[in-house]
Image (tube, rainbow, N blue to C red):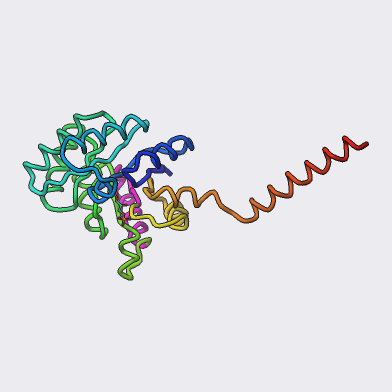
Amino acid sequence: MKFFIDTANLDQIKEAQDLGILDGVTTNPSLMAKEGITGEQNVINHYKAICAIVDDKVSAEVISTTYEEIIKEGEALAALDAKIVVKVPMIKDGVKAIKYFTSKGIRTNCTLIFSAGQALLAAKAGATYVSPFLGRLDDIGSEGLTLIEDIRLIFDNYGYPTEILAASIRGPLHIISCAKLGADVMTGPLTAILGLLKHPLTDSGLATFLADHKKAAEAAVKA
Ligand code: E4P
């Protein structure tokens, strides 16, 4: 399973990259705004700064909603760095744009996927990734994980190469469930990734090992 971090915060991206487990980054206009990144040039500079930290796969989302504008904006984003994946919303013009980007060899991430039908359309258009939003479905009382399961079944039935990028991940249990269901990628906050590290028996076990080691070393000195 590939691990992406879902943030525009450079310190958190560095921390995940330093851990040695990071495969990519996803951003969106809300995450950029949260970091106070506004204005075209600042946004461009921020994408470049992210690309300088990670090895590959930086999703940069278009804010255009018409075919021509999505193409223009997406091509400009893709030209910034070979690591950029153009993130396109699941709308009619977005699907057409994904088809165009695919024909030009530009990688795409179709975002705001909330149904299996949307994922199927994006895969047919050649999207590199589809991003089903688990947490937001859970928030409205819908079962986010069922969507991952359905998309996995459909993509496997037809051998679509489009990868399932489980998004809107809220915690470590979401990551584990998505891994069990065969999602290719997950994107989540640093807290969800670091949450995988934790187990109370690991902490108590390590404390015992270190205490026993210390005791044995003290006994050896006395002997
Ligand atoms: C996906 O790429 C989105 O950035 C994301 O996962 C949105 O998640 P949220 O529901 O936590 O905003």
List x then y, in percent, for residue 179.
Answer: 44, 51
Image quadrant containing the C terminus: top right
Asked if 142 appears above or below 83 in the picture, the reply is below
In the figure, is residue 169 to the left or right of 59? Answer: right
In the figure, is residue 124 to the left or right of 171? Answer: left
Q: How many marks?
A: 0
Viewer-proximal residue among 154 and 191: 191
Asked if 196 appears above or below 70 in the picture, the reply is below
Q: Quadrant of residue 26?
A: top left
List x then y, in percent, for residue 68.
Answer: 6, 41
Q: Residue at x 33, y 52 (%)?
A: 167
Q: Main secondary structure of the magenta part?
A: helix
Range drawn in magenta:
146-166
In the figure, is residue 78 to the left or right of 211? Answer: left
Asked if 163 appears above or below 178 in the picture, the reply is above
Q: Residue at x 36, y 48 (%)?
A: 187
Q: Residue at x 21, y 49 (%)?
A: 122
